[in-house]
């Protein structure tokens, strides 16, 4: 399970949707894309170690699936 952090635009390549505050998790074709709010609220690393930005729906779905920790509970 990966830690989660409050969304931080500095983690992303300038010019990418994630750097602009957009959800990159659902854009990658992940399940639940129809629930995407678009606005990034959480930063986390995916299973390949790349930084992703997730919206509030992505945060819920990833926590439910045990992929990331609930926001604010990381070490
Ligand atoms: Zn989303």
Image: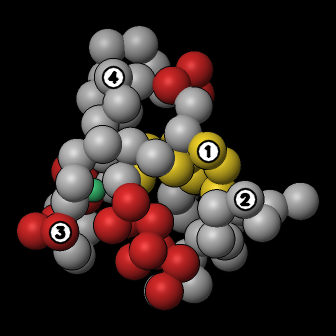
Spatial separation of the CA atoms under disc 4 and disc 2: 22 Å
Q: Is label 3 within 8 A of ligand 1 (CB to nearest ligand atom)? A: yes
- The circle drawn on residue 6 is 1
The first of marks 4 and 2 along the sequence is 4
The first of marks 2 and 3 along the sequence is 3
Image label count = 4
- Residue 70 location (% of width, % of height): 64, 71
Spatial separation of the CA atoms under disc 2 and disc 1: 7 Å
In the picture of the structure, the residue carrying the numbered disc 2 is 72
Which of 39/4 is in front?
Answer: 39
Element on which disc 2 rests: loop
Tag 2 and tag 1, C-beta contact below 8 Å = yes
Q: From the viewer's perspective, is 49 left or right of 73?
A: left
Q: Quadrant of the C terminus?
A: bottom right
- The circle drawn on residue 20 is 4
Spatial separation of the CA atoms under disc 3 and disc 4: 20 Å
The first of marks 1 and 3 along the sequence is 1
């Amino acid at each position: 399970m990966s830690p989660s952090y409050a969304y931080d635009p500095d983690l992303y390549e300038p010019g990418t949707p994630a750097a602009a505050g957009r959800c990159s998790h659902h854009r990658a074709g992940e399940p639940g894309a129809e629930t995407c709010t678009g606005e990034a609220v959480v930063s986390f690393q995916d299973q390949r170690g790349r930084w992703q930005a997730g919206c509030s729906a992505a945060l819920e779905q990833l926590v439910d699936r045990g992929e990331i920790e609930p926001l604010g509970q990381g070490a």
